[in-house]
Amino acid sequence: MGFLNAVYELGKQSEGGELASFLKLPLPFEKTGKPKKGGNEIRIHLIVENVNEKPLNVIGVASVDLVDFMSGEKDVEKWKTKYLYRHPVGSNAWWEFTPIFKISKKPPKDENKKRADFIGNNNGWQSDKKTHFFKIKNKMLMDYERSGYFSQGSVDRIMENLESKLDRILDLFSESESHLIIFGVEKDDDFLYPGEIPAFIDYFKEKMNSQIKKGKDEKKSVSIKARRCAMCGKETTTFVNLNKVFNFATFDKKSFLPGLDENSKLKVFPICTDCFKDFSRGRERLDREFLDGRTIPGIKIWCIPEIIGPHSLGSLEVVVEQYKEYVSKESTGIENMFNSFAEFENKNLLFHFIFWEQKNAKELVHAMVEDVPPTQLRMIEGCWRESLNAIETKEETIQKTERLSTALKFVYRTITDLGKKNEAETKHLRDLVVKIISSLLNGEKVNVDSVKSIFVERIPKLLHEKGEINPFFEIRNMFLIIDFISRFNSEVGK
């Protein structure tokens, strides 16, 4: 419960209105207060008869333009409200919370392939489910018309205008950027974002309400008895399961939790609507402020603080502000999150670490380490510094690489480099690194003999294989890791 309590408290200290609890930024945002490099908005200016009416009668598309993600004032809460964005419920859904289409994949350099991504071969996008235009029309816009938020024929008029402006859209794509295609309304030569359009706001609310389980079982058509919220203990008949916040459970497979009955999933961890809002706010901040995606490529690490004891909420606010100040320094930043946590001296402060991987809509947990004090992080860093001093000869190199974040990245790079030419082996070694790092954080001894065996098996190959890798440096790195783990095990045994 340590991790859940920490996310819950983080959400409770966050400010925002009713909708703000459920909103996210559509692209990542640096902890330094800057959008991550590589994000553009292609804005589709819709022409409507009356922006305040429902349904919106869309006449066509006035223009298409390009701006930077979060251009202008970098106020996160303001932009979350303007984008009105929330991640889709799943890849199989035929609707989205807001008319924002994300293209994370960089566009191909070949112009014909770039065009085919939008309209398919021979302009066959109407039946080609892989094209952007098919997805925009059928998996996003059409539900606005079905639900009565667009007038009949509006979507067809939008798509006809987009086809005629395709060359303009393609010209706006950069080969090195991620892109958002945002549908808004042209008003007085200005662009209204989805969160500034009443019909889009009402649509978002309707979809959010449909995600909250009402006091009726849709399959059995009987009333659901009041249950106690698993978090606050309040009795309610309106609740959701925690998978609406953390999609760890696999409810669509009979062999996984929560059991054989689809309806039993609400028995796993039901939470009331108030706690759902707090958890949603906490999750959004978790992804924005406490997510490390660089230490182990392919694995995301949530690192979240929790204060134990009285007045924890006020103390947590102080810790979060100190953390923000640390990572906003020019010399630190997102990649030094572990270093910032090791700096804290608060005796009532604990950290929780979740290692997870995004698998389509599912979030696959590799490891969970809870209740890690800052002293544990400093102990790991101290062992690493001692190993560097024992093996590294250059003082300048020691000073540059003595911090905790460098140690963890060094362990990953050295071990996974041994399987570079084999994807399956690299993944196996990556999983081993997750186990090693989670053991370090948890204060558990690492099986150094198994690490030695992996190194010994690969030394002959390093010595006889011709390539760019210098075997001397690789073998020295292996000795450094073995020395580091051995020192750590000795500290744990004390």
Image (cartoon, rainbow, N blue to C red):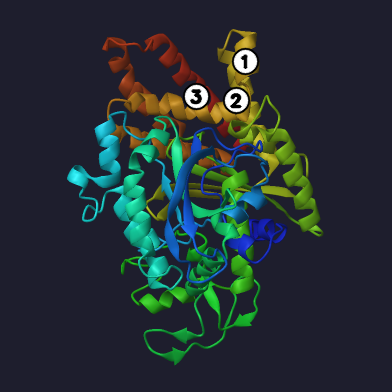
The answer to whether 147 appears left or right of 312 in the picture is: left
Task: Please state which amino acid type lies under the numbered disc 3.
Answer: Ile
> Which three-letter amino acid code belongs to the residue tagged 2?
Trp
Callout 2–callout 3 Cβ contact below 8 Å: no
Tag 1's secondary structure? helix
What is the three-letter code of the residue carrying label 1? Ile
> Which is closer to the viewer, label 1 or label 3?
1
Residue at image location 51% in from the left, 34% down from the top: 294
384 or 277: nearer the viewer:
277
Mark 2, residue position: 384
Quadrant showing the N terminus: bottom right
Res. 246 in view: yes
Residue drawn 37% across the image and 34% down it? 429
Q: Secondary structure at mark 2?
A: helix
Q: Which residue is mark 1?
A: 398
Give the residue displayed 56% in from the left and 83% down from the top. 237
Cα distance, mark 2 to mark 1? 10 Å
N-terminal label among 2 and 3: 2
Residue 223 against residue 185 in the figure, above or below? below
Point out which mark residue 481 bears. Answer: 3
Q: CA distance from mark 2 to mark 3?
A: 9 Å
- Above or below 48: residue 320: above
Asked if residue 343 can be seen in this view, the reply is no
Q: Contact, CB < 8 Å: mark 2 with mark 1?
A: no
- Quadrant position of the C terminus in the picture: top right
Residue 31 figure quarter: top right
Q: Is residue 433 above or below residue 387?
A: below
Q: Residue at x 43, y 91 (%)?
A: 222
- Closer to the camera: disc 2 or disc 1? 1
| Disc nearer the start of the sequence (1/3) | 1
Measured as percent of width and height from the top left, residue 183 is found at 47, 53
